[in-house]
Amino acid sequence: MDSLKEISDESTPPEMGWQVHRIIREITGNLDPYEAIKRDHNERILAIEAELTAMVDGSASPLMNAVKLAGRGNLIDMGPLRQWSDVVDIFAGFMNQESPVFDYVPFEASLGRAERLLYIGDNAGEIVLDKILLKQLGIFPNLDITFTVRGRPIINDATMADAEAVGIADIVTVIDTGADFPGVVLESSSEEFLTHYYHADMILAKGQGNYESLSDRREPLFFLLQAKCPVIADKIGCRVGDLVLQNGRSQPQTL
């Protein structure tokens, strides 16, 4: 608490979270307290990957439903209160989930124009759903995709080890942010990440932590997340629990 009192009012939630977990790691001597949970989530979602892929591939709108699936996967988060008994439970009815903020038309149009997509991932387990979406993005043959994970363990956010474990590293280029914030803090990111960030034609940022740290930026960003708290829901213009696909450069559209 003494440390938290010194945090600036201008700090983002990911910066505050980083401070909390830095102290936890120092006190416990455990550099990755969520390691077993991350491994379990990766394995559980990999076990149903083929089933989920078949559902997406067999649907009337595979790309849109892959987006919805990846967005629903953002519920796999050890930060906020969890409201599911088993990680697999969260996928029921994902294709029918409605949202007041789902900018799919400009999202698909941007993909058609882009040559370089930077896909900023979020949590372990969830990245298996990102993998399904990444495969769907193969319909854009001119799109060069780079996937991003955290530079070091923080909460249950995905790292390079997770990307390799679920097979994302086998299908696209994977880099890390160079930092261990549960979001993206540009001032602390690596030169490699910043080069990809500022040269991307399109950036897809997954999860609330990435939204909290990048939503005021003016780069060509799209945010894909589940709104998990009233503050962020109010800012986006949705309800807590809503699936969100938001064009960072436009007002929300209704699904």
Image (cartoon, rainbow, N blue to C red):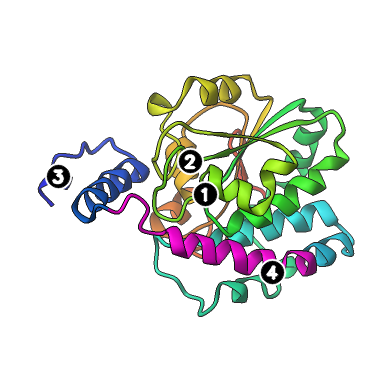
For the residues marked 3 and 1, what is the alpha-carbon distance in whole angstroms?
26 Å
Q: Residue at x 59, y 61 (%)?
A: 42
Q: Quadrant of residue 89?
A: bottom right
* Circle nearer the N terminus (4, 1): 4
Q: Position of residue 112 (x, y in %)?
A: 82, 33
* Quarter assignment of residue 111: top right
Q: Nearer the viewer, residue 35 or 212?
A: 35
Q: Nearer the viewer, mark 3 or mark 2?
A: 2
Judged from the image, the secondary structure of the residue bearing numbered disc 2 is loop
Disc 2 target residue: 150
Against 222, is 20 above or below? below
Left or right: where does residue 175 sit relative to residue 136? left
Q: Nearer the viewer, mark 4 or mark 3?
A: 4
Measuring from the top left, give residue 119's x and y in whole percent: 63, 38
The residue to which callout 3 is attached is: 3
**Magenta span of residues:** 30-52
Q: Earlier in the sequence, mark 3 or mark 1?
A: 3
- Between discs 4 and 3, the one toward the N terminus: 3
Q: What is the spatial separation of the Cα atoms under label 2 and label 4, in whole angstroms?
A: 24 Å
**Looking at the image, is mark 1 or mark 2 earlier in the sequence?**
2
Q: Amino acid at mark 2?
A: Arg
Secondary structure under the numbered disc 3 in the rendered image: helix
Circle 4 residues within 10 Å: few <14, some 14–19, many ≥20: few
Q: Label 4's element?
A: helix
Q: Residue 158's mark?
A: 1
> Is residue 70 on the magenta stretch?
no
- Separation (CA) of disc 1 from disc 2: 6 Å
Frontmost of labels 2 and 4 is 4
Which quadrant of the figure has residue 60? bottom right
Is residue 254 among what the camera can see?
no
Closer to the chain start, of discs 2 and 4, is: 4
